[in-house]
Image (spheres, rainbow, N blue to C red):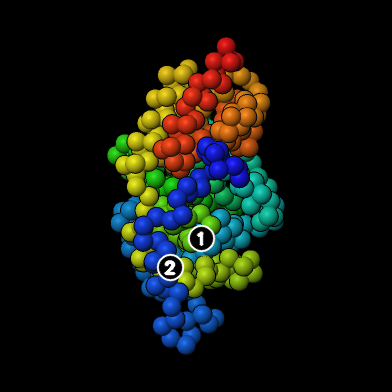
Amino acid sequence: MGDPDACDFLAGNPEVPALPGYVETLQKWLEPQDRRWFAYGMPDPRAAEAAAAALSDELGIAFEPNDILLTRGAHGAMALAMATVLDPGDEVIFVSPPWFFYEALILGAGATPVRVRANETTWDLDVGAIEGALTPRTRMVLINTPNNPTGRIYPDDTLALLAALLQRHSDRSARPAYLLSDEAYSKILFDGNVMRSPARHYARTLVVHTFSKSALAPAQRLGFLAMPPTMPDREALRKGAMSASFSTSNMAPDAVMQYALPDLLHITVDMDKLQLRRDRLLEALRAAGYQVHTPEGTFYLLVRSPIDDESAFVRRLAQDKVLGMSGDMFEMPGYFRLSITATDDMVERAIPVFEKAISETR
């Protein structure tokens, strides 16, 4: 990874120092405006108001500022949601292939992870499999849309079916089930797609958003957990979340990130360029003989390895300085993942390597 000639498709990392205006925005809010600029305090209400307005516009749901819980990125928001509603011994259903840390987060909350496989034909949710995994101990179902690594945006019909299933389960259970929706890639959408959130269908949905993906600044941790206006017992959940945020260190992002949030809403990755890069790589890989799924969103291409041992194939690519992620990292044997946050130059230099590698396997 340290080789300057490497073509790095490994993770969703920026290959430019920062998007235009990003550094200037942070510099602006780094300058103290009063004597308590960096003092202890409650979450910045201006940031919560801006996040609520933006999320309401994006999802068509009237979120209130008091229902926006600022966190250190999406990771912090998910940890906060689990700390707020889970008790030791509760079960959390999550969908495989997953983001790397879902299982660890569930275990860290003292709960039991229950894995359910996605539909491998469509990469949609397998609602029947989720139904089969429900038990009296199920307290949460965790989904990720748009999905990393498949790029699938779960359609409204599927989300409505899931909502109806969880409502039936909650109605007959002593404790209702929550739906935790990781929507970290909600602004990374291709081909005119729009964001579909289960919060439109299920009242007990906890929504996770982040500014780290859209601004291509994953190390600047800024995100939030949101409750829709339909959430039952909202006031009790707000108090529970406040208590959990103190006890788990998920209270809020650093002061500068909170102050900057309203200005960061408008600093986003160039989706036209990103889609062109996606299409260029899809075309080249398919022409070379690879099977590759067309993502509807996110930064990633999910590619079928031409040999069963995808780790060996990824190592073969790395010999020629092309870095991808082996499927065993995200429970997808036989596949590897490429991030299109790599530069256009990296794509062009990597294409002959992909062609050579698959040719050798034949």
Q: Where in the figure is residue 172, as x and y percent of width and height? A: 54, 47
Residue beneath label 2, please? 26
Disc 1 element? loop
Q: Where in the figure is residue 310, as x and y percent of width and height? A: 62, 26
Disc 2 packing (10 Å; few <14; some 14–19; many ≥20): some
Q: Nearer the viewer, residue 70 or 334?
A: 334
Q: Quadrant of the N terminus?
A: top right
Residue at 47% in and 27% down = 351
Residue at 51% in and 54% down = 218
Residue at 53% in and 20% down = 356
Disc 1 + disc 2, Cβ < 8 Å: yes
> Disc 1 versus disc 2: distance between alpha carbons?
10 Å
Left or right, residue 183 beside residue 3: left
> Compared to 37, does 180 lie above or below?
above
Of the two numbered discs 1 and 2 on the same chain, state the one appearing first in sequence. Answer: 2
Q: Nearer the viewer, residue 134 or 198?
A: 198
> Compared to 31, does 206 lie above or below?
above
> Compared to 272, does 306 lie above or below?
above
Residue beneath label 1, please? 220
Q: Where in the figure is residue 140, as x and y percent of width and height? A: 57, 50
